[in-house]
Amino acid sequence: MSQERLMKVLLAPHISEKGTILGDSANQYIFKVATDADKQEIKGAVELLFNVQVAQVRVVNVKGKNKRFGARLGRRSDWKKAYVTLQPDQEISFAGGE
Protein backbone atom coordinates (compact mmCIF):
# COMPACT_ATOMS: atom_id res chain seq x y z
CA MET A 1 0.00 0.00 0.00
CA SER A 2 1.42 3.32 -1.00
CA GLN A 3 1.34 6.26 1.37
CA GLU A 4 -0.50 8.30 -1.28
CA ARG A 5 -3.33 5.72 -1.38
CA LEU A 6 -3.56 5.62 2.44
CA MET A 7 -4.01 9.40 2.54
CA LYS A 8 -7.11 9.09 0.28
CA VAL A 9 -8.83 6.26 2.19
CA LEU A 10 -10.23 8.24 5.16
CA LEU A 11 -12.69 10.92 4.08
CA ALA A 12 -13.96 12.31 7.42
CA PRO A 13 -14.79 11.31 10.96
CA HIS A 14 -18.46 10.45 11.37
CA ILE A 15 -19.55 12.44 14.42
CA SER A 16 -22.84 11.28 15.95
CA GLU A 17 -24.34 10.55 19.34
CA LYS A 18 -23.73 6.82 18.89
CA GLY A 19 -20.14 7.48 17.80
CA THR A 20 -19.47 9.61 20.87
CA ILE A 21 -20.81 6.91 23.18
CA LEU A 22 -18.68 4.26 21.45
CA GLY A 23 -15.60 6.47 21.71
CA ASP A 24 -16.06 6.90 25.44
CA SER A 25 -17.05 3.35 26.38
CA ALA A 26 -15.51 0.95 23.84
CA ASN A 27 -12.57 2.99 22.46
CA GLN A 28 -14.11 2.86 18.96
CA TYR A 29 -14.17 5.62 16.37
CA ILE A 30 -16.30 5.92 13.22
CA PHE A 31 -14.96 7.21 9.89
CA LYS A 32 -16.44 7.81 6.45
CA VAL A 33 -14.12 5.99 4.06
CA ALA A 34 -13.69 5.53 0.32
CA THR A 35 -16.14 3.01 -1.12
CA ASP A 36 -13.34 0.90 -2.61
CA ALA A 37 -11.26 0.75 0.59
CA ASP A 38 -10.70 -2.54 2.39
CA LYS A 39 -10.01 -3.25 6.07
CA GLN A 40 -6.22 -3.40 5.72
CA GLU A 41 -6.11 -0.01 3.97
CA ILE A 42 -8.35 1.55 6.62
CA LYS A 43 -6.17 0.15 9.41
CA GLY A 44 -3.01 1.45 7.74
CA ALA A 45 -4.51 4.89 7.14
CA VAL A 46 -5.66 5.33 10.76
CA GLU A 47 -2.30 4.17 12.10
CA LEU A 48 -0.45 6.51 9.71
CA LEU A 49 -2.57 9.64 10.26
CA PHE A 50 -3.22 9.42 14.01
CA ASN A 51 -0.10 7.50 15.16
CA VAL A 52 -2.13 4.90 17.11
CA GLN A 53 -2.37 1.09 17.16
CA VAL A 54 -5.58 -0.39 15.71
CA ALA A 55 -7.01 -3.58 17.20
CA GLN A 56 -9.99 -4.19 14.88
CA VAL A 57 -11.79 -2.68 11.88
CA ARG A 58 -15.44 -3.34 10.99
CA VAL A 59 -16.94 -1.99 7.76
CA VAL A 60 -20.54 -1.11 6.85
CA ASN A 61 -21.89 -0.19 3.41
CA VAL A 62 -24.60 2.44 3.92
CA LYS A 63 -27.23 2.60 1.20
CA GLY A 64 -28.36 6.05 0.05
CA LYS A 65 -31.92 7.14 0.74
CA ASN A 66 -34.55 7.97 -1.86
CA LYS A 67 -35.54 11.63 -1.56
CA ARG A 68 -38.06 13.95 -3.19
CA PHE A 69 -37.21 17.42 -4.36
CA GLY A 70 -40.61 18.87 -5.19
CA ALA A 71 -41.96 16.86 -8.11
CA ARG A 72 -38.63 15.21 -8.85
CA LEU A 73 -37.36 12.01 -7.32
CA GLY A 74 -33.70 11.70 -6.39
CA ARG A 75 -31.35 9.41 -4.54
CA ARG A 76 -28.51 10.13 -2.16
CA SER A 77 -25.20 8.43 -2.83
CA ASP A 78 -24.19 5.15 -1.21
CA TRP A 79 -21.23 5.45 1.18
CA LYS A 80 -19.06 3.32 3.43
CA LYS A 81 -18.23 3.74 7.09
CA ALA A 82 -15.68 1.99 9.26
CA TYR A 83 -15.81 1.27 12.99
CA VAL A 84 -12.18 1.34 14.18
CA THR A 85 -11.34 -0.17 17.58
CA LEU A 86 -8.06 0.97 19.11
CA GLN A 87 -5.75 -0.80 21.51
CA PRO A 88 -6.69 -0.16 25.20
CA ASP A 89 -4.02 2.50 25.84
CA GLN A 90 -4.62 4.46 22.59
CA GLU A 91 -6.85 7.48 21.96
CA ILE A 92 -7.80 9.83 19.09
CA SER A 93 -8.73 13.43 19.80
CA PHE A 94 -10.78 15.32 17.18
CA ALA A 95 -10.81 18.49 19.29
CA GLY A 96 -8.11 20.32 17.35
CA GLY A 97 -6.18 21.32 20.52
CA GLU A 98 -2.90 19.76 21.49
Image: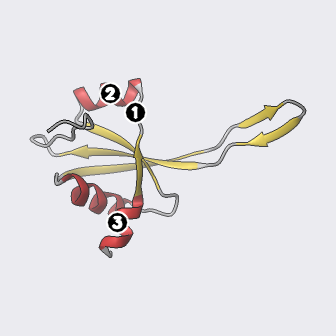
Colour approach in the figure: secondary structure
Q: Give the Cα separation between the discs numbered 2 and 1.
A: 7 Å
What amino acid type should be assigned to the residue bearing mark 1?
A: Ile
What amino acid type should be assigned to the residue bearing mark 2?
A: Thr
Q: Secondary structure at mark 3?
A: helix
Q: Which residue is mark 1?
A: 15
Q: Nearer the viewer, residue 74 or 56?
A: 74
Q: N-terminal of the two: label 3 or label 2?
A: 3
Q: Give the Cα separation between the discs numbered 3 and 2.
A: 25 Å
How far across and down, in percent of the image, does residue 9 sit?
Answer: 40, 60
Left or right: where 13 falls relative to 78: left
Q: Which residue is mark 2?
A: 20
How far across and down, in percent of the image, does residue 52 sit?
Answer: 16, 51
Q: Nearer the viewer, residue 32 or 56?
A: 32
Note whether 73 is above or below 4 in the view shown: above
Residues packed near mark 3 inside 10 Å, few (<14), some (14 to 19) or many (20 plus): many
How far across and down, in percent of the image, does residue 50 sit?
Answer: 21, 51
Q: Secondary structure at mark 1?
A: loop
Taking the view exactly as shown, the residue that stands out farthest to the bottom is: 2
Marks 2,1: beta carbons within 8 A: yes
